[in-house]
Each structure stands twice: as structure tokens, then as C-alpha cells.
Amino acid sequence: MKDFKEKLALVPTKPGSYQMKNKDGIIIYVGKAKNLQRRLRSYFTRTVTGKTKMLVEDIDDFEYIVTSSELESLILEITLIKKYDPKYNILLRDDKSYPYIELTNDKYPTLKIVHNVKRKRNKNHLYGPYPNVNAARKTVNMINRIYPLRKCEKLKKELCLYYHIHECLGYCQKEVPQEVIEQMKKEITSFLKGDPDHITKKIQEEMEKASLAMNYEKALELKNMLEDIETTLKKQKIDLNKGYNFDCVNYYYDKNYISIEIFFIRDGLLFGRHNEIVASLEDVESEVEEYLIKFYSNGMTPHELLVPEEMDSKLLEDYFQIKVFSPQKGKLKSLMDLAKENAKEQMELQEETLKKDDEERKKALEELKSLLGLETLHRMESFDNSHLFGTFYVGGMVVFDDFLPNKDLYRKYKISTEVKDDLGAMREVLYRRYFKTIMEESYTPDLIVMDGGQTQISVCKEILSSLNLKIPIIGLVKDKNHRTNHIMNENYEILPVEKDSKLFLFLTRIQEEVHRYAITYHRNLKAKGALSSVLDAVPKIGEVRKKELMRTYGSLKKIKEAPLEELEKIVGKEAASKLKEYIEDV
């Protein structure tokens, strides 16, 4: 550890954000503090363990930016974390964002599952979040079957199948009284707020009719619907005089880990809960704040947020622009205590597993560092390609930090139509990825994991050399049965790694994940040959041009028939040429 005694003496006692750097000048941790000097001293003047010890050993220098308030330091911290993605800042490891059920405010409403709720907040009715994703989907399907809401995104010119099976009122051709629509919305809203009476009554009546008609298959299906309702509405009644949304947050800290518990309270009901356990740097309150900011960036913040009294309620209130407070007594305090109890229980259930997993990953990292002669090994990137429509290619990149997936950094690539082979596709993806690194002066990984042996490693070395970059490379070589057989370094030497070792297992997980990611992207684009999906795959066609093409033509057939000159007016000469070439074989 370096001696920062003289530099620490010059740090002011004001609020601000600080940035820890490693020997390569890369920012590895961003934090904030009410008192910069006191906080920075704490890293170097006390005994540290766990993740904090790893951080301190990795620090070669630090910088800081003074701010005029704690809120400014928090905003700056979050901005820098997003920009640099430091390896020691807390990650939402499972990339979890819970879905909501949306009932639109259109003239003819629809009901569906949504994930990106921020832009929809003021327009439509949202219910959730739903921790049980499967039950939420079943709920939407069930309501859409029971109530003849609009099913299509845009009104069609003729009556569709949904009308003929009595699951739509034919809004495209029929005049539907507004009072009928309002009654449906009222009953659906009542159900989603926790009152199932209207819907269960309808299902029971239909179930009885089906039984009397000896249609036992339908009766069983309806019975399963009732069970799904029970699953979806399986909530604990909380006797609270609140008819709106709020979330209750608490945590439990023990031995370098934080267990964070969030209760979702909706209309006086405990609607669901979320728990995650993360490694801590012992700045617990700040880390929980950072976690909440990341967590709510994936969804809709509640009207109110309850937090423990040791956390800075005013700071979170200013940041989220909602009411944030710490209850001191009564039912809300009991709810906070219950959240902490659940956080502790989850910690006790998972602590040993987490420790074992951390130890195994750390041991595997040390083994790989030793085999490759590396001083630092944290971030790994891996690439794979997939054919599209038998000719065109798409690419995918996955990122792992300490053998844990960092899904925020995953990237998809549309590959130019001139590319006709795997190596050409890989060259393009690698060049685009690392050229961008140079242009934006962003991070480079500690290791590139290629899906293949000498040929793939050679291509990677060629691209890195052309960009004057030096990044270690390994290849995962498959046997004739397409199973990973051994690991090769950039000098084409086979590394002595046993197939039953944890290192071999962790590396093959990376390989499986990048393959899954690339092929899923390919399948999503190819699925049903949908116009929107095809346009997603075409280079030079972004979201604005895609929408204009869909609005103008409406189908792939019409785009194929359109003259090149006509397409050029909409998307430009180069993009029109790419589009024509791309859709010829679709």
C-alpha cells in the first residue's frame, strides 16, 4: 500500500466526490463524502478486510472534486459511476427490474406487461411491481380473455380473430358505448388493486356453465385461472391508512456483506418484496443509497420511500423528488423492523454460499493471473457471432467482472452486409469495440476471452495490433463434438487447466453466456420475419428511420417493392442501398 500521508493532509474537510485509481490510472472506485478528508483517511488508517482490503491494495492514487452540497456530491458520484463503471462500485448482479401491468388511457384501452415505465408514468395506469413475473403474465392473459379489450397495437381495417372468439368488441368496425369500456376499466382496476370479487365471480359462472355442458377441459382451465388469481394476489394485509404506493427499505450488515430488503406496499397491501446481498466496502449507508439509485433507475419510484433513520432522508428526497422519511413509532416503524428482520434472515440463509462462491471466484482469478503472468485481472470481455437469415451476421459482447456478468456493459452489433464469414464478422466486431475505446478514451478489459483457438486468437491479435492496443487474450478451444476441450494463451500454448476445476467452469460459463446472448439477439431479429425485427438488423437504420419506414409502408413486402429512389428520400442514399441488399433474401 502506498503512503498517502502528505496528500491526505491537503484534502479539505468539505463535501465532494472522490475517485480511486489503480497503477494504470483507471478509476476503480467512486465515492462521496460529507467530509472528504475524514472519509479518505478512513481507507488508509484502519484495518480493513474483505472487498475493502482488495480495493485499498489496488489503489495507486486518488483524486477528489469538492462540491457545494451533499446533493451535488451524490449527483456527481452517480454521474461518474455511469461514465467510468468502476469495478468496486456496487452492481445489481442479476440485472433485475420487475415488470408492471399497464392499463392504457386510450379511447379503446389495452392491458399488457411493461418494463420501461418511466416514460409512461403520467399517461397510463400502472400496477406493480410484480416480483412473480410468471403470475403477472398469466394475470394479463386471463384479464384479456375475460374482458374484450383491444388486443392489437393499431386498429385494423377488418375484424380479426379476437372478435370472432369474443375476446374483443371489434373496435375497428363497431361502435362501442363508452360506458361499457368504463365499466370494464373499473372492474379491472378494482382487481389489480386487490379486490378479485368481480373477476372471480365471472370465472366461477363460466366454470359452472362449462361443467354443465360437460366441457371439462374448459372447466379445468378456468379452475387454473382461479388458482393463478390466488397466486397473484397472495399478499399480506398491512393495516395502513394509505391508499397510494410507497416502498419500505431496510438492510442488515454483517462481515463485509449488506443484505438489502425492499417491501413494495400498494394500496395498503404488501404486494411483494425484493432482496439482494452485495459485498460491501464498509461505507454502508452510502452503498445502500447508491444501490437504491441504481435499483429505481430500472423502474418507477414510489410516491414515498421509507428508510432507516441512520440514512440521509433529506438527501434521497432531494435526489428522487419524492417524500423520504424514517418512521420512529407505530405501524410504519413495525414495518421497517419487519423489513430488517427479513434482510437478516436472507443474510443468514445465503451467507455461507456467498462466501464460498466469492472464495472460489477469487481462487480461480488468482490461478488464471498466475498462468498468464498478469498483475491485474478483473474485467473480461468475450465475443460471438450468429448468422441472420442464413447470410447476414449479428454480433454480441458480454462482460464479466470477477467471473460475474456485468449486463449493463453487454453490447449488440449489426454487422455490415459485405461480411460473408465468421472471421470477417469477428474482425468487424472487435475493431468497432476497441476503436470506440480509443476514440472515447474508455476502459479496456484485463482479458479478452475468444470463443475458439489459434484462428480466433490471431484475428484478435491482428485487430489489437492495428489499433496499437495491448490486451491479453485467451481462447477456449472446442473438440470435434463442439465441447470446450482446452484453453490456449495468445502464444498458442495450451494452459494446464483441469476440466473439473473451478477456473475451467467459470471460463466455460462466459463462453456459454456470450453464445446465448448472440444467438438470442439473432433469434429475436429473425422471429416471424417481423418487419420491425428485420429493420432492427439493418445497418444505418436507427429508431427514427425505422418508425418512418413502418409508418410509410407497413410491411416487408411493400418495402421490397418500393423503388430505391423512393427509399432514399426517407432514409438517405447509403441506408437505402443497405436496406435493399439486406431484405433481398428475407
Image: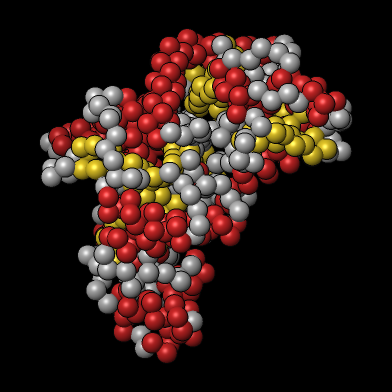
Q: Is residue 377 left or right of residue 14?
A: left
- Residue closer to the observer: 136 or 505: 505
On screen, residue 262 above or below 18:
above
Residue 291 in percent (x, y) is at: 60, 30
- Residue closer to the observer: 582 or 223: 582
Residue in the image at 62% along x and 35% along y: 22
On screen, residue 570 above or below 368:
below
Residue 354 in percent (x, y) is at: 44, 18
Residue 415 in percent (x, y) is at: 37, 65
Residue in the image at 46% along x and 31% along y: 402
Q: Is residue 19 left or right of residue 92?
A: right
On screen, residue 386 above or below 538:
above
Q: Is residue 460 left or right of residue 4?
A: left
- Residue closer to the observer: 69 or 238: 69
Quadrant of res 248: top right
On screen, residue 145 above or below 307:
below
User: What is the image's colouring?
Assistant: secondary structure
Quadrant of res 366: top left
Residue in the image at 68% along x and 44% along y: 79
- Residue closer to the observer: 537 or 468: 468
